[in-house]
Image: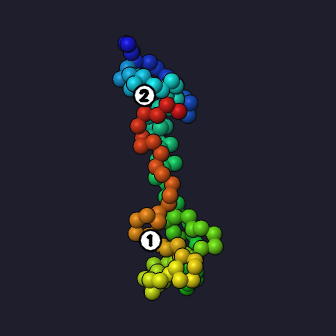
Amino acid sequence: MEFTDRVLKCIDCGAEFIFTAGEQLFFHDKQFTNDPKRCKQCKAKRASSSGRARTETRTTCSECGTATTVPFKPTQGRPVLCRSCFQKQPGKASASGAKPEILYPATAALSPTREPGGGGLDPS
Ligand SMILES: [Zn+2]
Ligand SMILES: [Zn+2]
């Protein structure tokens, strides 16, 4: 099957962009039936705004009351500790039942939101 470059219009900014033969071939391979709707810039913009946006939530340490911001969304009712209070923790936090949601989590405690797509060609 032969493909030729096509000019499409971005639904976000209205700019015309090229849907290249190579991209069409890629879509064809993936059996995507929809044409791309956004130019590369708008696609990149969407990816960066939905994916990597920092969640900075203002909160106060439930131990010492210090106002702070945390890089994740604290769960309602869960204690949030500032860094110094977290370091003071004896390490058996679950004894009371409520596991504190820590500040500056090592790895896994960060936002569970997955990164969408990966910025590749996406049919929607
Ligand atoms: Zn655009
Ligand atoms: Zn504190």
Q: Which sits earlier in the primary sequence, circle 1 or circle 2?
A: 2
Q: Where is residue 9 in the image (x, y as percent from the top left)?
A: 52, 25
In this view, 92 is above or below 44: below
Please tell me which residue is depicted at 58% across the width and 77% down the height of the picture. 98
The residue tagged 2 is: 30
Please tell me which residue is depicted at 63% across the width and 69% down the height of the picture. 76
Q: Where is residue 93 in the image (x, y as percent from the top left)?
A: 50, 81
The reply to whether residue 16 is in sight is no
In this view, 123 is above or below 118: above
Report, in whole angstroms, how far the alpha carbon at label 1 lies from the one at label 2: 40 Å
Q: Which amino acid does label 1 sit on?
A: Tyr
The foreground one among 10 and 80 is: 80
Q: What element carries label 2?
A: loop
Please tell me which residue is depicted at 49% across the width and 31% down the height of the picture. 123
The residue tagged 1 is: 104
The foreground one among 117 and 37 is: 117
Q: Report crowding for label 1: few under 14, some 14 to 19, many 20 or more residues within 10 A (C-alpha).
A: some
Quadrant of image for the N terminus: top left
Q: Report crowding for label 2: few under 14, some 14 to 19, many 20 or more residues within 10 A (C-alpha).
A: few
Q: Position of residue 2 (x, y in %)?
A: 37, 13
Q: Does the residue labelled 2 lie within 8 Å of ligand 1?
A: no
Number of disc labels? 2
The reply to whether residue 86 is in sight is yes
- C-beta proximity under 8 Å, tags 1 and 2: no
The foreground one among 81 and 96 is: 96
Q: Is mark 1 within 8 Å of ligand 2?
A: no
Please tell me which residue is depicted at 42% across the width and 22% down the height of the picture. 28
Q: What residue type is labelled 2?
A: Lys
In this view, 42 is above or below 15: below
In this view, 67 is above or below 24: below
